[in-house]
Amino acid sequence: MATYRRHSTAFKLQLVHAYLNGEGSYKELSARHGIGHSLLLLWVRKFQAGEITEEQDQSETVREYEARIAALERKVGQLTMQLDVLKKITPPPTSKSDESLIIAGPKVSLLRKDAK
């Protein structure tokens, strides 16, 4: 069964520019990056025909960011709902600090041995 990988526009442009700048042949660059040399040849032809552009890379990046933001917003919503449920079923904690007043401070002991 064949497995297909999807490469980002930025990756395609990186390899196309590397080839066009003379940083290696189709076979050298494709071997270095683990793709078939015919795929790199296809990308170069598409770039020269205007089918792979910098604008595509930018719009792809924006779509990825929007998807990530939507996922994070869903997570915040879930956590907010869980917190609301927990607040309803869990009584507020009580501690000994409830014995002190904000204005007057803690209760003063009348015994001399407690004083320091």
Image (cartoon, helix red, strand yellow):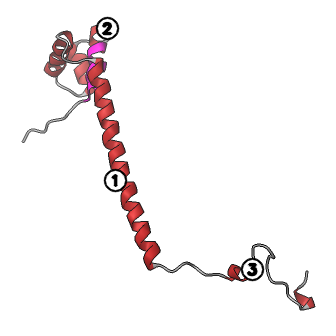
Q: Would you place residue 64 above or below residue 12 in this image?
A: below
**Which of the pair 28/15 is nearer the observer?**
15
Name the residue that disc number 3 marks.
100
Residue 21: give its label: 2
C-alpha span from label 1 to label 2: 44 Å
13 vs 92: above or below: above
Residue highlighted by disc 1: 74
Q: Judge by depth and name the residue closer to the eye, 79 or 18.
A: 79
Mark 3 residue type? Ser
Q: Would you say 15 lies left or right of 107 here?
A: left
Residue at 33% across, 39% down: 66
68 w.r.t. 63: above or below? below
Furthest-left residue in this view = 1
Residue at 20% from the left image edge and 9% from the top image edge:
48
Which residue type does callout 2 highlight? Answer: Asn
Most foreground residue, 36 or 87? 87
The spot of residue 106 in percent (x, y) is 79, 79
Image side of residue 47 versus residue 65, left or right: left
Reading the chain from its start, which is encountered first: label 3 or label 1? 1
Query: For residue 58, what is the image quadrant?
Result: top left
Q: Sequence order check: which comes first, mark 1 or mark 2?
A: 2
Farthest residue to the front: give it: 103
SS label for mark 2: loop
Task: Estimate the x, y position of residue 75 in percent, counting from the top left.
Answer: 36, 55
Q: What stretch of residues is rendered in magenta?
A: 8-17
